[in-house]
Amino acid sequence: MVDSLNTPGRLKLRTSALRAYTMLLALMAIWVFFQWATIDQYHPYGLFLGAINFSKLLQQMAVTGVLAVGMLMVIVCGNIDLSVGAVVGLAGGIAAMTQGRGLVTCLVLAVVVGLVIGAVQGALVAYLNIPSFIVTLGGLQAWRGVILKLTKGATVPVELPVFRSLGRDFVDPRIGYGLAAAGIAALAWSNIRRNRARRRHGLPQLSTVATVVRIVVPSIGIVAFILLMNQAGGVPIPVIFLLAVALAGAFLTTNTTFGRYLYAIGGNPDAARLSGINLKRYILGAFCLMGALAGLASLLHTARVGSASPDAGTLMELDAIASCVIGGTSLMGGRGTVFGAVLGALILASLDNGMSLLNVENWAQYVVKGGVLVAAVGFDMFGRRKA
Amino acid sequence: MRSITKSFPGVKALDGVSFDLNEAEIHALVGENGAGKSTLIKILAGVYPYPDYGGEIVIQGSERRFANVRESEQAGVAVIYQELSLVKDLSVAENIFLGREPQRFGIINWQELHSRAQKLLDELHLSVDARIAVRHLGIGQQQLVEIAKALSQNARILVLDEPTAALTDAEVDTLFGILNKLRDRGVAMIYISHKLDEVFRISDRVTVLRDGRTIDTKLTADLDEAGVIARMVGREVDQLFPAAAHVPGEVVFEARNVTVEDVSVPGKLLVDTVAFKARKGEVLGIAGLMGSGRSELLMALFGAHAGRKSAETLVNNHRVQINTPADAINQGIGFVTEDRKRYGLILDQTILNNMTLACLRNVSGRFLTNDDAETAAGERAVSDLRIKTTSVLTLAGTLSGGNQQKVVLAKWLLTRPRVLFLDEPTRGIDVGAKQEIYTQIRELAENGLAIVLVSSELPEVLGLSDRVIVLHEGRVTGEFNRADATPEAVMSCATGHARRAA
């Protein structure tokens, strides 16, 4: 019978969970290494994980992280989007050029541009059955061309202060504490609600100890994070966006029918179709979300750089895909988590940041990042074969 | 081949089969699906290498032990499977010499390739240009290209597995002409077919297999179709099937004028004006051999056929339009598809996710999922259907075939259907699990579900069904009540030998 379900509080190491822990361990190892490597006379405990640098690292990963969440959904349903870098450039350019029409207009316009492009490309993939690789490879070139036409090759500076602050400023430390309190409250509430629901459905409930552990352990993490960020002036605004997108993405993929269907479509399209799922609609949905998130990412990127240049966003699609893959996403579709994708982006950003701190030469940085990508997938395949 | 034995986990597919083949002979191999024909051929072809089987293969006096397909080919054995193994975008000549191109230092001698290929085609009186892509040929011509390929390897033993399944009558005539010519040249052929009229037209001898045993080998001239059918089915419907005695209720599902066209061959009808009614509390069996249009019929009614089709469907005597699987599910139709790994399950997801996939919005919520409601429903299904698993979070791919099949069944029962289509519900699962599924099917019918059962295993259809309709080449050729449905009578209709109305 179904014994293991009678003890839901026990730590169950499922394969997906195991993979997540392996990645976390890899991240920890990278952090410890850079922390050790950045010890010098001014920083006896190392520089890497200090508040200032860590805050900078998170700001660096925000754009890739936001894109990776969108990319995850596209990949999970068995597709790919190679155009996101160009979309970031185009949406950012349009936002910078329309600043004269007001803050709200230019910000909303960037997201709408991304959404429309996602919808067009998604429709071509879902309804005309053109492979997404082709559609978005075409998009990669075409949208870059549109940028050149619109900007006439010039770089457009960001002038509106609020726009600029999206990429550069921090929220007030008190807001940070407020967020921490809200997060802990939400955590507690969801756990209690879950136990109630389990009782209602006649399933065994978690013990009080287990419930407390499930609330307290993440809470400590939240508080530590906020304290660290506040030491460096508060949580950076791009990081707030990333957290919001990641939480929303995690919710969407694990707690909605939309998310479940994406995994089903990627896992076995025939079975999904015969189960009454409208494949086209959900594939279109994934591309729309990807587009809108690319629009959002374009704002964060443009604001951070302080201007929109015609080549902005170049190769960002590859960082987003690499983040997903390092985070355990299968390019065949059907497998991957938002948590993994964001973790992948964090690993990539940590490598970038750490190697820059160590003054590793540019060429070597590329080689290391490429090697990590292949090694991560290699370990994954190796582990899968053994299992 | 002497006393060939082959076991799969849980199943003994061949049990001491002996089979002999003379030079310049066409020897037909017949039997129900699952009788062991394919397994026997795969052993001869080296697909199941020595020593994975028992017994011995003797070719021209010496025992051969094939480690792989290549060795079997070198010994002069060529198999033409039902699913043709041509590369569609390569030319005819390239296909014929694939892997054996005339070449020097890796550079292909195209002239020789094309002229040798053309010579082979001419020998077969096949008026096809060796340079055109196989894609542009009809199925019948592709079949002949396969034969040309076999001949180019100097095959002495040619195995044809259901070669006429996709052919028109004219193409069959061409094929038979060529087979006769090959026989005159001394080639020995094994001819596997469900179509007894063809067996009698072309073969010199017939061997009947049943349940992995050789039943009989006789000169074709000494047999008649009835005799072959009797040998094919000659077994009692054993104790596997739960007794059934219940009163069917009103008609809940009716299909009229169902016509289904082949996706890749426009104009070829896989199902031709079929009609049937399914009653509450009744198991309606659809018997028919492979290629009779059984699965296509169900797929089309479920709104899942990719090609052209037309059908009138009535649910509870109201006409309904079913264009997509979602429409069908909304009308209360469930469909346990054949080939659970391809159509039924997402193997690397949990059995819980698999079970709730078709009913997610009812069990869970329209937009938000509810893990606990799902888990509760899933656990109920696991215990109701006695699925053997440690948890509903086990990955579907790790279960045994029987339990996987139960997961698919659970998935459709969770949609609370009025009508349940079952397509090959016990394919590839062991006897114990089969019996459990049989019991469950009976119970479901007794609880008021209308069940439409398609199976290529005749005893299964006969043992479970209250009523049986028989398909042959896309048409209904017979309808039987439980009492009249003898294996011989049903098989006669299924092979196109007889017709009968209830």
Image (cartoon, grey):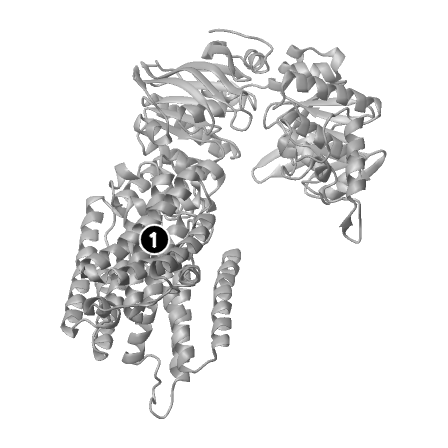
Is residue B163 visible in the rendered image? The answer is: yes
Residue that label 1 marks:
A290
Q: Quadrant of the N terminus of chain A?
A: top left
Q: Position of residue B289 (x, y in %)?
A: 56, 21
Q: Nearer the viewer, residue A141 or B363?
A: A141
Q: Position of residue A221 (x, y in %)?
A: 25, 70
> Dot 1: what SS?
helix
Residue sitting farthest toward the top: B501
Q: Nearer the viewer, residue A300 or B274?
A: A300
Q: Position of residue B131 (x, y in %)?
A: 71, 36
Position above or below: A42 against A124 = below
The subunit carrying tag 1 is: A
Instruction: Give the residue displayed 40% in from the left and 27% down from the top.
Output: B303
Position above or below: B248 against B374 = above
Residue sitting farthest toward the bottom: A41
Position above or below: A173 against B35 = below
Is residue B238 visible in the rendered image? The answer is: no
The image quadrant of residue B100 is top right
Q: Position of residue A20 (x, y in %)?
A: 39, 62
Q: Nearer the viewer, residue B55 or B80?
A: B80
Compared across the picture, whether A227 is left or right of A316 comes to left
The image quadrant of residue A47 is bottom left
Number of labels in the image equals 1
Instruction: Give the residue displayed 39% in from the left and 84% down from the top.
Output: A38
Instruction: Give the residue displayed 29% in from the left and 59% down from the top.
Output: A94
Q: Amino acid at mark 1?
A: Met
